Amino acid sequence: MNITATGQAVPAGPATNLDEPTAHGDARGPLVKLAVGAIGIVFGDIGTSPIYAFRETFAGHHTLRVDALHIYGVLSLIFWSMMIIVTLKYVTVIMRADNKGEGGSLALLALINRSVGGKRKWTSGIVLLGVFATALFYGDSMITPAISVLSAVEGLTTVQQGFEPFVVPVAIAILIGLFAIQSRGTAKVGLLFGPVMIVYFLVLAVLGLMHIMDHPAVLWHTLNPLNAYRFFAEAPVRAFVALGSVVLSVTGAEALYSDMGHFGRNPIRVSWMFFVLPALILNYMGQGAMLLSLPGHAALEAIRNPFFFLAPDMLRLPLVLLATFATIIASQAVISGAFSVTQQAIQLGFIPRLRIQHTSETAAGQIYIPAINWALMIMVLLLVLNFRTSSNLAAAYGIAVTGAMFIDSLLISVVLFQLWKWNKIGASLLIALFVIVDVSYFGANLLKVPVGGWFPLMIGLIAFTMLTTWARGRQLLMVRMAEESLPIEVFIKSASQSAARVPGTAVYMTSSSEGVPHALLHNLKHNKVLHERIILLTVRIQDVPYVPEHKRAETHDYSSGFFRAVFHYGFMEEIDVPSELMRLKGCGAVCKMMDTSFFLARQTLISTARPGMALWREKLFAWMLRNAESAMEFFKLPPNRVVELGSQVEI
């Protein structure tokens, strides 16, 4: 990928071999310590699902009878969904497809693009799928904090029914506080995440075991897939509809892959297989066992919030508080994930520059993006105020998750067949299993569209339109500017002898590693002078998360004081042009910032009827370009050493 002089990336061919392993993005450290950290960060979303997933299957918008057939059927569906989607698909298969240690839809897309990009006609479709998965993530990141916190606070009504009017105000207060502290970073709070979530999962397991002992038959019936089959055989329509709520038990599975770069695949696998998965299954079975042990009227009362009724009366308030802390942690992980995905999308050229603040001096991945933070907060608060209850929000939840899971299955199929060259029969059967499960869950969630499922789809479509408009607009802008480009050799011969030379170094940021930057032409035209040393600088974002230091810079000497430099960065790295310039070799003497001027081109777009994009998309792109963060801040250029030269470009 190329990053332009205004800080945006567009596809580009490989410049150097950057495929060798690096020390970055590969989590190192004691397995136990990393596994504990993973429990605190990675499993927050899926860990809070027992608060509402089992309840929604029976007491949601499409109710089920609370009897043995349906309880065993739902428990079997939850267990086998976790085994197929989380354990087999994500933990066993997809987590092997890391991009230099990093995971997530964009990292997987970059891996595929680097390996087969441009070699197949269908690669453009794969890119669009990856972008759409990213767009769906934003809808999911809005619903997760709202439903998680709201479902935990609703536990207060199981302590005292009179608390019901306070549920929404308390949830809003918690969410506002959560978003308000994002700018301070999560390093200190993060130290508490692991221990709190360990306690939370232990409580899940203990509460479940307490009730399983009263009805031990639930163990076998949960593990027996025939119960899921009997559920579908008895009532196929109700069973299919129930899938729309059962899938809530595996929301957050994609976080295992996305957060792989922070902890490594082995700590996440160990945490899941030996701690998180058993705790979750025990809790779900405990909820089912409790309902089976209660008489009819008591079961109907308990089904409205079975998670909290697992606890004795005297321990219910502490459970509400613990669950609230757990949902705050889950929400924090989703918000941090939104920051991380946005940073990757900016680097890879799908989102305009946004102001990014680093909240930790030691952890490069801890960032804060104000625009994303406040936009998420507004949307989350609107969701809470509009839907009012977690049951209503559950109707909106799931469709974005299942859509992203389906896209992940399609992306991993490319990896299995094109990159890993697996046996075609074995790979086809595995992908068929994943696709059948994903399509079933996605189809069931489509039934939710009229009652709330439209929201994540709307957010996803808006985000997809903006992402693709920005990427396409940057490509068109590059083409238009290249049409007016002048070969550098011709320019040097004509200008180096005729123009006056002044002391110092001029760095011209350019998106292309060929031709003369527009800013240089405009400067010579208006000021009639050239600096003694001129560096034409291009920053390229590669399809790898990190680039080793020894492959950071390429240089070329054109003579007559003209040099070209190309800096390579990974899509997870922070760009710091002045620091790299002061270490740059091959372009004469060491660059001193007090003797260096940076020249940037600022384009004003003029929408035309030329082929490229629809007129409304051209206007949308122009608006996005005007509101992008300053290239000066993006590249960390010293403000008192920057000169911006404007030009008009027709697209």
Image: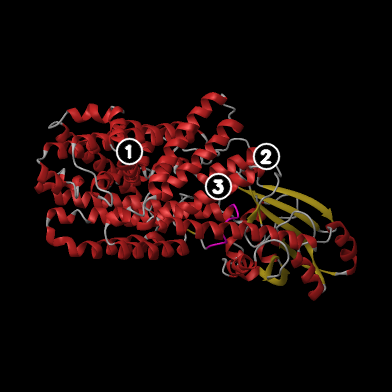
x and y percent of residue 149 in the render? 28, 55
Mark 1 Cα within 10 Å, few/some/many (few <14, many 20+)? few
* Residue, disc 3: 129
Mark 2 Cα within 10 Å, few/some/many (few <14, many 20+)? few
Task: Judge by depth and name the residue closer to the eye, 363 or 544.
Answer: 544
Residue at x 83%, y 58% (from the top left corner): 488
- Report whether residue 510 is seen: no
Residue at x 57%, y 38% (from the top left corner): 22
Give the mark nearer the N terminus: 1 vs 2.
Answer: 2
x and y percent of residue 527 in the render? 79, 75
Q: Is residue 459 highlighted in magenta?
A: no
Image height of 284 relative to 339, above or below: above
Task: Judge by depth and name the residue closer to the eye, 634 or 640.
Answer: 634
Q: Quadrant of residue 457?
A: bottom left
The answer for how far apart the CA atoms under marks 3 and 2 are is 15 Å
Residue at x 42%, y 56% (from the top left corner): 456
Q: Is residue 325 left or right of residue 418?
A: left
* Residue, disc 1: 236
Identify the amino acid type marked 1.
Answer: Pro
* Residue, disc 2: 120
Q: Which residues are magenta?
A: 348-354
Mark 3 Cα within 10 Å, few/some/many (few <14, many 20+)? many
- Report whether residue 417 is seen: yes
The answer for how far apart the CA atoms under marks 3 and 1 are is 31 Å
Task: Judge by depth and name the residue closer to the eye, 414 or 39.
Answer: 414
Give the mark nearer the N terminus: 3 vs 1.
Answer: 3
